[in-house]
Amino acid sequence: MDYWFSEQQARLRRLPDTQRYLYPKIDWSLPCLGILGARGAGKTTMMLQHLREHHKGSAKALYISIDHPKFQATSLYDFGREFFAYGGETLFLDEVHKYENWAGHIKALYDSCPGLQIIFSGSSILQLHEQDVDLSRRVVLYSLHGLSFREFLLLEIGLSLPILGLEDLLQDHLGTCQEISSQLRPLEHFENYLCYGYYPFFLEGKDIYGLKLGNVISQVLETDLPMARHISFHQINKLKKLVTFLAENVPSQVNIQKLSSLTEISRPSVYEYLESLSKARLLNLIRHSDTGYKKLSKPDKIYLENPNLAYSLSENINKGTLREAFFVNQVQNAFSHHPGILETPIASATQGDFLVQDRYSFEIGGKSKGTHQIQDVPQSYVATDGIEVGFGRKIPLWLFGFLY
């Protein structure tokens, strides 16, 4: 145990103070909770911040990174039992998806160690769905997304601004934009956010951000997906080809047959891989509202999960696609903190680009974009890039980065 407490102390010494949006939303008193999210989103930092705030200096709380080489030959269940036997009360388990049958070990610990709190994180929702053991009655799951534009500003320039509710944003966007614009130049920082602001590790150096993000993508495609889906190496290369193709092409009417031909992946497998890539936080799949958001139905539009991925995967950045990807990402993230929720708050629309919460219609475009395409649609708006302050139904696109 001494070794792991020493490792824990080393991590706590270099811990930042800024908390992510999800931190205050978590009920940290739950007997068993999980934090799931993309690699690099800040799950480890958040767990360690809670440990430091509530258990610093205590031998009753311990953080373990499951992917540590020293832990690979250790039985998670036996380790937890020993920790509990010596008075342990809270066990933090990081990167659980790297451990075979992790759900079975957590279930056994939960059942055999009454009073032991287990807090775990995982970088891939895929592994959650592939586990043979059902944890639904024992664990509450939270979903951590990448940085919002609002959070990026806090980390980048130290400016703390409040989260906006969607209805408040729509009703008073003029006053809100004027207030924010009096404190910074939002368009300047917005361009930086689209390029390198989604993952907190930009703080480790912007010059190596692209390299780190490339490693994240490779880890998902070469490690997470094969572990969850038992995909062969040959198929992984096809998946890379699929992701690259999607990064370089403007979303339009999705042609599954074309994707199948280009990647040499069968049509049924294309559907499955698209869903897997969505769960792995590399893609966002948008379906028409008429489909009822059914999984494994053909998506109407496909976007990279966040704009930073586009800069990492392609040299041909389409500005229109980037705008739509940003809007989808921020709206999606704002309304989905729990990964068990199947329905998405955003769908493609018959008139306009997107329908949000089955109520608000949005067209996405540059500053010359007018409202004529949605002029007869009730509760419709244009999310406009390239403007600091909007008017009427034209709202600055960057403002939707304040939803979480």
Image (cartoon, rainbow, N blue to C red):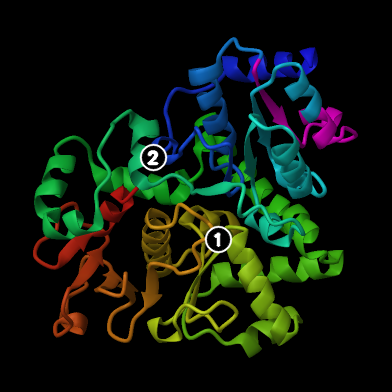
Is 63 covered by the magenta stretch?
yes
Residue type of the residue flagged with mark 2: Phe
Residue displayed at 22% across by 69% down: 382
Q: Position of residue 376 (x, y in %)?
A: 14, 85
Q: What span is in magenta?
A: 60-80
Indicate the secondary structure of the residue bearing disc 1. loop
Q: Earlier in the sequence, mark 2 or mark 1?
A: 2
Residue highlighted by disc 1: 315
Front residue (pair 232, 247)? 232
Front residue (pair 39, 178)? 39
Residue highlighted by disc 2: 152
Residue type of the residue flagged with mark 1: Glu
Residue displayed at 65% across by 89% down: 257
Quarter that holds the N terminus? top right
* Residue count near mark 1 (Cα–Cα under 10 Å), binned few <14, some 14–19, many ≥20: few
Q: Position of residue 5 (x, y in %)?
A: 71, 15
